Amino acid sequence: MKRLRFMVGLMCMMLLVGTMGNFAEAASPEKYNFVFITQWGPETMFAAVVKKGMDDAAEMLGVNAQMFFIPKEGDLAGQLSHFETALVKKPDGVITTIPHPTVFNKVIQKALDQGIPVICSNTNGLVGTGHPLEKTIPYVGQDLFYSGYVLATKASEHFSEPKEMRALVGIEIPGASWAEARAGGQIKFLEEYGCTYDKLDIGTDMAVMESRILAYLKKHPETNVVFTQGGAGPAPSGKAVRLAGYKPGEVIVAGYDIAPASISEIKKGYVTLTIDQQPYLQGFLPVIQLYLMKKYGFSTWDVDTGLGIADKSNADLVEGLAQKRIR
């Protein structure tokens, strides 16, 4: 039902956008300036997909949209600095990731006080905090906690009983809201079914991930499931499983996103599945919302961008779309 509501809403929105496009030239639309403040570095493949969605929406509507990256992913101070700098130029709207429950509250409120609308995309650290901004800022992205629960549920389908699972829950950035939320969903499932699990800091560098997961597997050979939270995680997890001497399918490796390396490991059989949160929509839809707010005075709305499963059954399809920066 949730997915149905999303699809109906998306189709209605696209019809509206198409209508706008038909009369845009005659109406001489304002050249709005939107900014997207991110927690990502410029080399992040995931960010490239989000940016393509943003760029496509901006081109379609005839607005300006600029994405700000930070030198090192997860540098909250750097992201906050970009946000403050962007406000000096008084943009018509701000899209931002919110990877921490409190760090960005003051600057978000500052933007709102200046009459600048703010939309959260991809990561919403405000969820569950009870802060007034939690109900004020719309969110376009994945329901992170629920996605973690779904990921664990899908992994359990490879066992006759869920309690047979002996899992490693890898955390790329301990304390980061997006990572903890996804891991929290996985842990909820594991605890409900009495599964054994460990939580481990695996870092964000792929070589470090591989090394730490490999060391864990050697120390705990009874492990039969490996979860990771970030888009880079499935590939080094799959490689670690292979280096540890397991055959394809002996350890269920489950993670997130459609990175080329992850698709390659899915085809080899060392990554079982990933959840695609459809990052293209996380760039595309916020621009649409800001445009509708500025031009027509519409309110915003939350969008769960999905729980698309990528596995061997559709690896070729998603690989082709990933090459186009659509998935």
Image (cartoon, grey):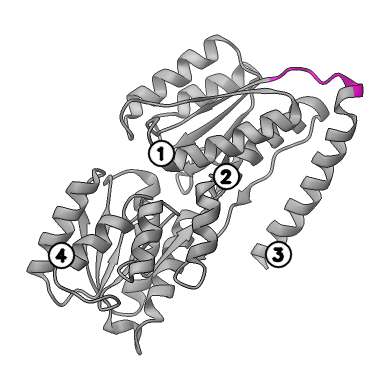
Q: Mark 4 sits on what residue?
A: 243
Give the image location of residue 141, x and y in percent: 55, 47
Q: Nearer the viewer, mark 4 or mark 3?
A: 4
Residue 125's disc number: none
Element type at mark 1: loop
Q: Mark 2 sits on what residue?
A: 280
Q: CA distance from mark 4 to mark 3?
A: 42 Å
The residue type indicated by label 3 comes to Leu
Q: CA distance from mark 1 to mark 4?
A: 33 Å
Q: CA distance from mark 3 to mark 2?
A: 19 Å
Label located before the other in sequence (3 or 2): 3
Q: Are marks 2 and 1 in contact (CB under 8 Å)?
A: no
Q: Residue 173 lies in what quarter of the image?
A: top left
Element type at mark 3: helix
Q: Mark 3 sits on what residue?
A: 4
Q: CA distance from mark 4 to mark 2?
A: 33 Å
Above-or-below relation of 327 to 54: below
The number of callouts visible is: 4
Label located before the other in sequence (1 or 4): 1
Say left or right for 218 vs 169. Answer: left
The crowd level at tag 1 (other Cα within 10 Å; few <14, some 14-19, many 20+) is many
Q: Is residue 120 found inside the magenta-colored segment of the image? A: no
The crowd level at tag 2 (other Cα within 10 Å; few <14, some 14-19, many 20+) is many
Q: Which residues are magenta?
A: 26-32
Label located before the other in sequence (2 or 1): 1
Q: Nearer the viewer, mark 1 or mark 4?
A: 4
Label located before the other in sequence (4 or 2): 4
Q: Mark 1 sits on what residue?
A: 99
